[in-house]
Image (cartoon, helix red, strand yellow):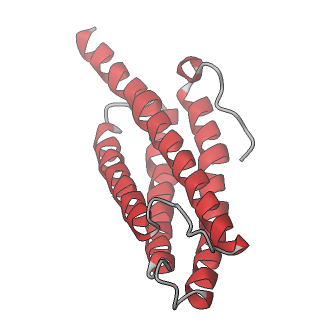
Amino acid sequence: MNAQVPLDVHALSAEELVTYIVGRFHTGHREQLPELIVLARRVEHVHAAHPRCPVGLADELEAHLQEMESHMLKEEQVLFPMLCRGMNGPAQGPISVMKYEHVHHFDAMERIHDLTQDLIPPEDACNTWCALYAGLGAYARELAQHIKLENDVLFAKASQAVKGAQNA
């Protein structure tokens, strides 16, 4: 998760962008989410009586992990290979589906923010609770960067290639 976004992502080929997205974001999400679920379950168990306990957070994260895994697999197995082969026209349907699912990922993050009172731990929160909220904040930033890179660069390039081919 230490890799920085390349300075000029717009200069990268579809294949280079895909390699970067999978290595930087897909791998990272697959590491982050299970760890966050463990922390959330621990906080919910230990602090169940606390009035600010984020009851239901672990379940929300589990559901989000399943959605993310399904989404990432569709990208890795269907959409990304199409884009790497320059099949930009046929990829427009799958791109629409991925963009629609991206909106649902943001909805999930909104629910997580609601459950955690905007990721602000109570004053008496233990280290685990603080680590959970810090980790959720980092994950939310990673997810936003991931989605922005796909929507605004990778998918936009494919759409521009289709328009360019239609105008030629």
Residue located at (60% from left, 48% from top)? 25
Residue 126, compared with residue 95, is above or below; it is below
Q: Is residue 11 left or right of residue 168?
A: right
Task: Answer with left or right where residue 60 lies relative to residue 17.
Answer: left
On the image, the x and y values in percent for residue 166 come to: 24, 16
* Numbered label tally: 0
Image coords of residue 82 (percent x, y): 45, 40
Residue at 38%, 53% in the rendered image: 106
The answer to which quarter of the image holds residue 164 is top left
Q: What residue sits 64% from the left and 31% below the top?
A: 5
Toward the right, the furthest residue is 2
Q: Is residue 11 above or below residue 152?
A: above
**Residue that sits furthest to the front in the current view:** 123
Instruction: Report the front residue among 35 and 129.
Output: 129
Q: Where on the picture, by quarter, is residue 99?
A: top left
Left or right placement of residue 70 versus residue 45 in this view: left
Q: Is residue 82 above or below residue 77?
A: above
Please identify the quarter of the rendering in which residue 95 is found. Answer: top left
Q: Relative to 21, does residue 159 appear above or below in the rendering?
A: above
- The C terminus sits in image quarter: top left
Residue at the farthest top position: 168
126, 132: nearer the viewer: 126
Q: Position of residue 155 (x, y in %)?
A: 40, 33
Query: Residue 129: x percent and y percent?
Result: 63, 72
Please give left or right for residue 1 compared with residue 50 in the image: right
